[in-house]
């Protein structure tokens, strides 16, 4: 009887140790993936910073264009050329930002499988919450990207109509109103994204330091 109890105890201990080893393996896999994902997030953040600076430069040209005398066609065309070069740069940076965030996102969602294999309930809950937060962040940033693309399209339409000397002031004013409204929406969206990102980073640090 004592030998049977000893065998059961040893068997239970082996299961426990295997469980611990499995958790260590899954935790290491999760931490490695998060570090790799963070590298893409770093590039994404740099893209957004460059995008913001380029947008400010484009905005200054846009404001100057609005204030120019409609009869000063030479000055208008010069500013339109500058504005269109900034638009191309924004499109490039927007594509890079989208690609880098997508890579970061795809890496994080692959963690669902190792998370399911974990025994540590606390870490499992934290990692599951991180995936949920990443999905929420993706929805927000996708909205930002969509609005940004639409704003670039509207700005291009504005520049094209302004370059055409047969434009209607009413049409230009409608485009200006649309651009301004969408820009305000984008600022609110990116603010929401930044707040959720800080929460995501805080939780990510807890998992990495586990």
Image (cartoon, rainbow, N blue to C red):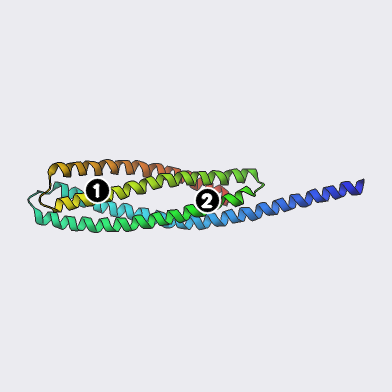
Numbered disc 2: secondary structure: helix
Name which quarter of the figure residue 191 lies in: top left
Residue 156 versus residue 210: which sits nearer the camera? 156
Left/right placement of residue 125 relative to residue 43 reads: right
User: In this orientation, does residue 41 appear?
Assistant: no
**What residue is at 52 percent from the left and 56 percent from the top?**
35
Callout 2: few (<14), some (14-19), or many (20+) C-alpha neighbours within 10 Å?
some
Secondary structure under tag 1 reads: helix
Q: Nearer the viewer, residue 173 or 34?
A: 173
Q: Are marks 1 and 2 in contact (CB under 8 Å)?
A: no
Judging by the rendered image, the residue that carries numbered circle 2 is 109
Write the residue at 61% across / 56% down.
Answer: 28
Pointer 1 local density, CA inside 10 Å: few below 14, some 14–19, many at least 20: some
Q: Which residue is mark 1?
A: 154
The answer to whether one can see residue 131 in this image is yes
Give left or right: position of 123 versus 20: left
Spatial CA distance of label 1 from label 2 is: 34 Å
Q: Mark 2 or mark 1, which is nearer the start of the sequence?
A: 2
Image position, residue 155 (x, y; %): 23, 50
Q: Position of residue 60 (x, y in %)?
A: 22, 50
Q: Quadrant of the N terminus?
A: top right
Q: Could you tell me which residue is drawn at 29 percent across and 58 percent down?
A: 89
Relative to 171, residue 77 above or below: below
Q: Relative to residue 200, is residue 85 drawn left or right?
A: left
Where residue 129 sits in the image (x, y, percent)? 54, 43
């Amino acid at each position: 009887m004592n030998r049977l109890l000893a065998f059961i105890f040893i068997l239970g201990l082996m299961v426990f140790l295997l469980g611990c080893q499995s958790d260590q393996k899954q935790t290491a896999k999760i931490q490695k993936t998060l570090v790799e994902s963070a590298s893409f997030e770093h590039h994404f953040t740099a893209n957004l910073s460059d995008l913001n600076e380029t947008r400010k430069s484009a905005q200054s040209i846009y404001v100057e264009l609005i204030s120019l005398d409609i009869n000063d066609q030479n000055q208008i065309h010069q500013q339109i050329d500058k504005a269109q070069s900034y638009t191309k740069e924004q499109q490039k940076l927007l594509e890079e930002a989208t690609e880098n965030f997508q890579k970061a996102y795809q890496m994080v969602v692959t963690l669902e499988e190792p998370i399911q294999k974990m025994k540590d309930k606390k870490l499992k809950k934290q990692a599951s919450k991180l995936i949920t937060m990443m999905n929420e962040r993706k929805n927000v940033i996708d909205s930002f990207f969509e609005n940004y693309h639409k704003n670039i399209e509207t700005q291009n339409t504005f520049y094209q109509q302004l370059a055409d000397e047969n434009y209607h002031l009413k049409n230009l004013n409608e485009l200006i109103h649309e651009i301004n409204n969408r820009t305000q929406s984008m600022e609110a969206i990116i603010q929401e994204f930044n707040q959720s990102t800080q929460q995501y980073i805080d939780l990510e640090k807890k998992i990495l330091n586990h």
